[in-house]
Image (cartoon, helix red, strand yellow):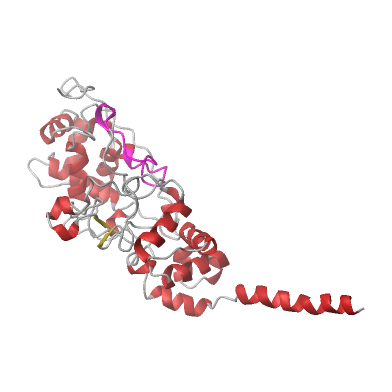
Amino acid sequence: MMRLAMVVTALPLAFGAVSAVAAPIDDAALMTEAKALFEPVPQVVPKVSGNAVTGEKVELGRMLFFDPRLSASQLLSCNTCHNLGMGGDDNLETSVGHGWQRGPRNAPTVLNAVFNVAQFWDGRAADLKEQAKGPIQAGVEMNNQPAVVVESLKSIPTYVEHFKRAFPGEADPVTFDNVAMAIEAFEATLITPASPFDQYLEGNAAAMTDAQKRGLKTFIDAGCAACHGGVNLGGQDYYPFGVVERPGADILPPEDKGRFTVTQTAADEYVFRAVPLRNVALTAPYFHSGNVWDLNQAVAVMGTAQLGRDLSDAEVADIVAFLHALTGEQPRVEYPILPASTNATPRPVLMMPN
């Protein structure tokens, strides 16, 4: 009887220990804390500085985004590296461009990119229209020239009509600048609202699981939100990769000095724009090198490199659960039927130049 009593007595103690670990979450307090650090993705397309987002411009931009004739080979489009069916990137370590060349960095997602302070890992493009011009001209990417792009588009009457409607009143609307403006207008529509986290921010306590809520709390308490805040949970400032402990050369290649290549300032060596975390569960592999394929590993690396903390397996699991709550409604984009080339359209250049 004494043995049985001891067992029975021990049971409440054991259950008490479990309940202490899994303490109830104070949703009201957590929501208040989160609202001070983050914003939900809006349901409507945001304004774009210096570029009115009109229906005609968005339609033209959608066509151009999917048109491989912006590349010299006529094989690569914007969607090749920023696949809208795969989280807005290509899910490769580094992208494959003209002549099967490999790019130097992992392709960032185009989804919600309109909310970033600047574009590319090093912030070398101030906005999406400037960013759009870069890959088209880069030899390792689309390897084309602005004059050839314009020649191609002017050779196709349907495109000329689209440019006239998108840029009314311009004597010569088919320009490389307007190509970039149209692509920017379309990309501004590629937003992903209504994620479980957005719904939680807006007051729906049931939108996230307990694990996701614990992950949000850990994300805040551990200091992750210091770099990954705002509407895009990142993308707003630049930070050294390896604040506390620099990762190995496989994750942080020594030859890629990040923002230093833009500013030529020693303090910017190995400094990168904080990656936006919206839809991060869809965009493996991770980091600018693209050498980490597992989200759990990526979180653990950030713990040691940026926070100086060896996050426990439970903390990592909860943070990853929270990151999955950042997957929003994916944009539904109909693939456009593109107008046919004409005899005046420049022919594809498939090989790398000598």
Please state the horizontal and vertical placement of residue 169, each as a whole percent of the image: 10, 47
Residue 85 is covered by the magenta coloring: yes
Q: Is residue 318 above or below residue 131?
A: below
Q: Is residue 165 visible?
A: no
Residue placed most toward the observer, 133 or 178? 133
- The tally of labels here is 0
Quadrant (top left/top right/bottom left/bottom right) for the C terminus: top left
Q: Is residue 354 left or right of residue 222?
A: left
Q: Is residue 337 above or below residue 18?
A: above
Please state the horizontal and vertical placement of residue 290, each as a whole percent of the image: 36, 45
What residue is at 34 percent from the left and 67 percent from the top?
229
Quadrant (top left/top right/bottom left/bottom right) for the N terminus: bottom right
Q: Is residue 285 above or below residue 9?
A: above
What residue is at 52 percent from the left and 69 percent from the top?
214
Q: State the image quarter where residue 64 is shown.
A: top left
Residue 306 is covered by the magenta coloring: no
Q: State the image quarter where residue 14 is shown.
A: bottom right
Residue placed most toward the observer, 37 or 132? 37
Please state the horizontal and vertical placement of residue 40, each as a whole percent of the image: 39, 66
Q: Main secondary structure of the magenta part?
A: loop
Which segment did they paint magenta? 81-101
Q: Is residue 324 visible?
A: yes
Please state the horizontal and vertical placement of residue 77, each as a whole percent of the image: 28, 35
Q: Is residue 230 left or right of residue 328?
A: left
Task: Specify the farthest residue to the top.
Answer: 343
What residue is at 43 percent from the left and 51 percent from the top?
330
Task: Specify the farthest residue to the right.
Answer: 1
Residue placed most toward the observer, 319 or 257? 257
Residue placed most toward the observer, 10 or 87? 10
Q: Is residue 216 above or below residue 161?
A: below
